[in-house]
């Protein structure tokens, strides 16, 4: 089953290069995403057995990531049908890269070997790069270049970290996760610490943690809304999964304090930096990109803060992904309607496109964590974890930064919604597919904010037990 | 065979220094190709008598990919544009050599305190690989041309691979192939992006000035 999950999108991506019509490619992408979704949904009942001598294994942690990926691709595939109705350019390379991306991301979620994990994460970088420069103008090419270079270097450092881990584990003779966990006590501490530092720098770079976040506003600002959704919601979860896997080893090897102190520092930095830059931003997509950096900071902070924080972080992974769907799909639909996402060009959305205007408000509330959106709960859980573990200062800074983000994003989004359009825009009809994808996500995010379903709670609890966090004063 | 291993390690570091101090892009690509070839030979010196089929295979693939295919892709990327030479690096060529030398000295000093577990074949592998990584990093941040930045990235990868050959038993062949393939695809995509950037640049500046063509990117 796991092989099927990875191979199906891969083969279909190759099929896209055959001479088929534009519509057929969109439908193929929709069908593949929905099939992927169905297979993943069947895993919620029963986890599949491992494959290839334990190299591909799906555990509850992987299932969370896999479900996020699957949902995001399904909603994007619905949105795309509407988007490409008004887009004259060919979508061959675009769809092929999306399918390759789906395949490699699924591989990340199920790989149980650190080398394989690295290969898969690097592959996600490569297949997402051509997606950013879809419009192929100078700015988008520059953004692609920056993304490719910064992330490749970051990932190269993570490869060095992987080799250091191999040295630390020279008694274990393998980089398979179960073997590493079993032999955790025999790992060489110094080499382990060195490898942890390289892992955090490398995979943190791919996640967009400050101070290696510089590619993020550029890339998300230039990419179309759909690509930004997949990058901010799903692609960033892949390196985060790698960081969680490392925390699994650290918890067994008695390096928890060392690891969590680094995580807390880098999480704090990623909270402060976007809060500083957001107030000067004049572009919706770039503002949302800063919000994404902020959320990555929150995730990493949660991972560093003991069991309660961990539960919050895993819950926040899901909420952040859903919020990003609302934010970037709406931004993408605005950008297509106005031909720009700059706050100076886009005005009076709610007068011309009432639905999109409402979605923008939902995006603001979901992205900044306002009740009843579930982002509120997970952020509260992580702040709570900071207070329980007596990091009062940290909690205070966190609240202040979140307030700054709310003001910054609110200023841009409200300015865009109200105000008078510069010149009367000929209102095109809103597209039902584009709106449906956003409405479903809004409803989902609100409903898990109001009531958490039992299977989800069980899954997150299982994942927390799997990570084996025994640290903090919880 | 230890002396051969030591010699290749030192050659690899020297070749990175040569790339750092060079300003002709074509020459830099050729030097990189030689460096990758030496890297490919290393497993034969390391496991001289008892080399396994796996190691031979990986060494062969490394040589073909990094010493032949990747350089030819890079030559393809620079074929149109007048980007035969690096224009204005952020740090001058002579000062980069001095900085580079200082970096190498620093790395050798630091790696005195890093002990590889087990009995390593050569004490030079660790410091040499770390110096190559840092030199590659330095090429990347101090050069302004897209192709030279790619070369910096590749030299960095070579440094990491130098480290990896000393621990061949942890990575299964298939995954090692995956790593090589990833790097190959990375260079391929980077070359395509460089090409697009050049095209876009020519479109925009054709009427303004011919001399600025290909600068910065």
Image (tube, coloured by chain):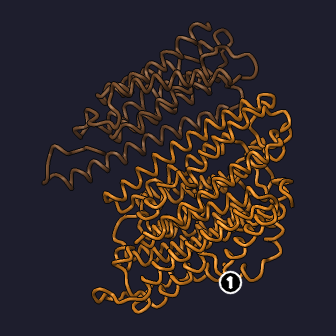
Q: Please name whichever residue, A438 or A382, is drawn nearer the observer in this view of the structure.
A: A382
Q: Please name whichever residue, B174 or A156, is drawn nearer the observer in this view of the structure.
A: A156
The answer to whether residue A34 is seen in the rendering is no
Chain ID at mark 1: A
> Quadrant of the image for the N terminus of chain B?
top right
Estimate the x, y position of residue B102 in percent, counting from the top left: 48, 24
| Mark 1, residue position | A372
Q: Determine the residue positioned at 42% across, 78% down.
A: A334
Estimate the x, y position of residue A336 in percent, counting from the top left: 39, 76
Label total for image? 1
Q: Determine the residue positioned at 49% across, 18% down.
A: B38
Estimate the x, y position of residue B46 in percent, counting from the top left: 63, 14
Estimate the x, y position of residue A183 in percent, counting from the top left: 85, 36
Q: Residues within 10 Å of mark 1 (few under 14, many from 20)?
A: some
Quarter location, residue A388: bottom right
Instruction: Look at chain A in the picture and name its colour.
Output: orange
In what element is the residue under mark 1? Answer: loop
Q: Please name whichever residue, B211 or A303, is drawn nearer the observer in this view of the structure.
A: A303
Quarter location, residue A166: top right
Instruction: Look at chain B in the picture and name its colour.
Output: brown
């Amino acid at each position: 089953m796991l092989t099927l999950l990875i191979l199906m999108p891969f083969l279909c991506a190759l099929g896209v290069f055959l001479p088929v019509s534009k519509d057929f490619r969109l439908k193929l992408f929709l069908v593949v995403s929905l099939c992927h979704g169905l297979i993943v949904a069947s895993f919620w009942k029963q986890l599949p057995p491992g494959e290839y001598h334990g190299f591909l294994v799906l555990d509850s942690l992987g299932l969370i990531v896999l479900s996020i990926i699957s949902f995001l691709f399904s909603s994007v595939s619905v949105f795309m049908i509407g988007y490409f109705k008004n887009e004259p350019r060919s979508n061959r390379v675009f769809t092929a890269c999306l399918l390759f991306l789906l395949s490699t991301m699924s591989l990340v979620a199920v790989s149980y070997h650190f080398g394989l994990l690295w290969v898969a994460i690097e592959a996600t970088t490569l297949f997402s790069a051509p997606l950013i420069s879809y419009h192929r103008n100078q700015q988008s090419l520059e953004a692609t270049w920056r993304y490719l270079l910064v992330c490749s270097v970051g990932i190269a450092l993570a490869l060095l970290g992987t080799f250091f881990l191999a040295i630390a584990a020279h008694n274990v003779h393998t980089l398979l996760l179960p073997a590493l966990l079993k032999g955790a006590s025999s790992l060489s501490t110094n080499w382990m610490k060195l490898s942890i530092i390289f892992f955090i720098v490398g995979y943190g770079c791919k996640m967009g943690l400050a101070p290696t976040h510089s590619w993020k506003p550029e890339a998300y600002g230039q990419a179309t809304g759909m690509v930004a959704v997949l990058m901010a919601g799903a692609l960033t979860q892949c390196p985060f999964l790698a960081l969680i896997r490392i925390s699994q080893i650290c918890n067994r090897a008695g390096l928890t304090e060392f690891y969590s102190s680094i995580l807390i520092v880098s999480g704090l930095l990623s909270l402060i930096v976007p809060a500083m830059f957001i107030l000067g931003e004049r572009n919706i997509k770039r503002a949302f990109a800063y919000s994404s950096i902020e959320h990555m900071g929150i995730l990493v902070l949660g991972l560093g803060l003991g069991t309660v924080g961990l539960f919050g972080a895993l819950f926040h992974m899901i909420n952040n992904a859903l919020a990003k769907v609302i934010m970037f799909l709406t931004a993408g639909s605005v950008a297509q309607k106005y031909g720009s996402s700059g706050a100076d060009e886009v005005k009076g959305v709610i007068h011309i496109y009432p639905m999109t205007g409402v979605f923008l408000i939902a995006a603001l509330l979901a992205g900044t964590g306002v009740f009843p959106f579930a982002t509120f709960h997970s952020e509260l859980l992580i702040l709570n974890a900071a207070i329980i573990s007596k990091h009062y200062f940290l909690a205070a800074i966190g609240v202040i930064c979140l307030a700054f983000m709310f003001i910054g994003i609110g200023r841009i989004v409200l300015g865009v919604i109200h105000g008078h359009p510069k010149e009367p825009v000929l209102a095109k009809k809103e597209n039902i597919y584009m709106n449906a994808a956003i409405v479903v996500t809004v409803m989902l995010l609100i409903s898990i904010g109001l009531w958490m379903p039992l299977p989800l709670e069980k899954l997150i609890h299982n994942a927390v037990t799997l990570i084996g966090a025994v640290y903090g004063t919880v | 065979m230890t002396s051969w291993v030591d010699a290749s390690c030192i050659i690899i570091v020297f070749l990175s220094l040569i790339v750092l101090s060079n300003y002709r892009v074509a020459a830099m690509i050729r030097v990189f190709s030689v460096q990758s070839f030496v890297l490919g030979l290393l497993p034969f010196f390391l496991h001289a008598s008892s080399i396994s089929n796996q190691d031979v295979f990986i060494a062969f693939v490394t040589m073909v990919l990094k010493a032949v295919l990747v350089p030819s892709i890079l030559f393809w990327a620079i074929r149109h544009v007048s980007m035969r030479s690096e224009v204005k690096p952020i740090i001058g060529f002579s000062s980069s050599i001095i900085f580079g030398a200082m970096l190498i000295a620093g790395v050798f000093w630091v790696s005195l305190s890093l002990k590889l577990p087990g009995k390593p074949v050569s004490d030079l592998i660790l410091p040499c690989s770390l110096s190559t990584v840092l030199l590659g990093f330095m090429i990347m941040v101090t050069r302004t041309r897209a192709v030279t930045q790619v070369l910096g990235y590749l030299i960095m990868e070579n440094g990491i691979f130098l480290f990896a050959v000393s621990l061949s038993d942890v990575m299964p062949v298939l995954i090692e192939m995956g790593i090589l393939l990833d790097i190959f695809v990375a260079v391929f995509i980077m070359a395509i992006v460089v090409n697009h950037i050049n095209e876009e640049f020519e479109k925009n500046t054709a009427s303004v000035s011919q001399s600025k063509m290909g600068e910065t990117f």
